[in-house]
Each structure stands twice: as C-alpha cells, then as structure tokens.
Amino acid sequence: MRTLPGTQYRYLDLLINIFVVVLIVSNLIAPKPVAFYVPILSSYIGPLTVSAAQMLFPITYIFGDVFTEVYGYSASRRAIWTGFMASAIMAAFGMFAIWLPPAPGFKDQAAYETIFGVVPRNVAGSLLAFWCGEFANSLTVAKMKVFTNGRYLWTRTVGSTIIGQAVDTTIVIVIIFWGSSFSRMVNLIVSGYLFKVVYEVLATPLTYWVVNTLKRREGVDFFDRSTNLNPFAIGVPVAPVALPEE
C-alpha cells in the first residue's frame, strides 16, 4: 500500500455536519418523556420511560463508530469537539433568548422556556457525559481495530457501545439526578443504558453497510497505529488515503 498525503475526503465534512444536527436536535427534543408498553405473551410490561432524545441520540454513537473506523480517531476527535462546541453555543443562546423580554403579543413564553430553558447543572452533565462517552467510544474502536487487524467489525461496534454508553449514561444521570435516591439513579442508569445498547446492536447491519460503502468510495481504511490519541491534541491534519500499489 502507498499513501497520497493531503487528500481531501469526499464525505467527511458532510457527515460531521449531519452528526452535529442530530446532536442538537436530540438536545431540543429531550424534555419530552416517552413511555413504552412492551407486549409479553398476553400481557404488557411497562411503562418503560425514556427521553425522546434517546430515540435519536444513540445515532451519534453510530456516527462515532463510522468516523473512527473509516477515517481514524483524528476525524472522530474533530467531530466530537465540533458537536461539543455546537451544543454549548445552543445552550448559551437558549438561555439568552429566554432572558430577553418577550414582546407584548407573545403568549408562549412558558412553552418557550420549557423547550429552550436549561438548568446549568443539566447542561454541564449532558456536555460532560457526551464528551467522555464519545471519546471512550472512539478510543475503543481505534484500539480494537488495531488489535483485531481490521477484522470482526461487529466486535468494535458492540464493544465501543458497551463502554461508551456506560460512561455517558452513568455520568449524565449521576450529575443531573444527584440528590435523588440511589435506587432511582440506578434504575435510570440501567434502563437508559440497556435501551441505548440494544438500539445500537440492532443498528449493526446498517453500520456495516455505511462503513463498507464509505471505505469503498473514499478509498481508505484507516488504522490508528501511530495516532496521538490525546483528546486535547491541537490540529487535525488530513489523514492520508491508502491507495493500492501500482
């Protein structure tokens, strides 16, 4: 194999933009709880209550798998920091918009505050959980890909989800619900974690298709054998694209 330094990827910027949109939308729809009743034989169990965001947020971890698997850890690091800053800006401007005095004819201030109103502790917990969980997810993919020499993609998608979602769910629940009973926090952590893991395991065939399609179209299959895995590393050079020998 040889490399062509400085080659620009065709789809990376588009995928990062979609990743950020999904992340921001999941933050906006988070205030609504959703209850599911699961049919078991002739009865139902439930309600299993999750945030509306949990219907969408796990997709960001699938994106994390794709970024690291196809483009390498550096690309995933870039996406995570972009998403982190976008979420912080959205939260800050949401609070600012609520603070601004409403016009006399505006009758929906309370509803507006419900959607865009944020509690500082909730924002801090969500951002910290996202940052830690996404980096744990991407680091796991990068390390396991080198360890397996690029084989058994499913072990990386499932293994990174198990680790990343455990970090994310535990941090966000502990920070946001600190002061609640221990049993309530454990219940929220376990139910949210299991929902996210099952969600992403079921999405494994889709992840396979996206990863294989991008590798073929981009002409790259990046291995992080010498990548600086420090999440605070400054500067993300464009990774070389692997080309077949002539």
Image: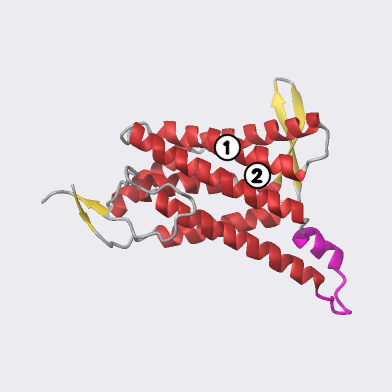
Report the span colored magenta. 100-117
Residue 54 image label? 2
**What residue appears at the point 78 percent right and 41 percent down from the top-left corner?**
177
Above or below 99: residue 193: above
**What residue appears at the point 34 percent right and 31 percent down from the top-left corner?**
148
Q: Nearer the viewer, residue 194 or 86?
A: 86
**What residue appears at the point 45 percent right and 49 percent down from the top-left corner?**
230
Q: Position of residue 1 (x, y in %)?
A: 18, 47
Above or below 103: residue 182: above
**What residue appears at the point 13 percent right and 49 percent down from the top-left corner?**
245
Q: Nearer the viewer, residue 15 or 149?
A: 149
Residue sitting farthest toward the left = 246
Kindly indicate the quadrant of the structure image that contains residue 225. top left
Res 197 seen here: yes
Q: Position of residue 154 (x, y in %)?
A: 42, 33
Q: Is residue 113 magenta?
A: yes
Residue sitting farthest toward the top = 41
Residue for badge 1: 199
- Which amino acid type is shown beneath numbered disc 1? Tyr
Q: Is residue 133 left or right of residue 125?
A: left
- Which amino acid type is shown beneath numbered disc 2? Gln
Q: Nearer the viewer, residue 179 or 4?
A: 179
Tally the numbered discs.
Answer: 2
Q: Is residue 123 magenta?
A: no
Q: Earlier in the sequence, mark 1 or mark 2?
A: 2
Question: Are discs 1 and 2 less than 8 Å apart at CB?
Answer: yes
Residue 59 image label? none
Above or below 106: residue 76: above
Helix, strand or loop at mark 1 = helix
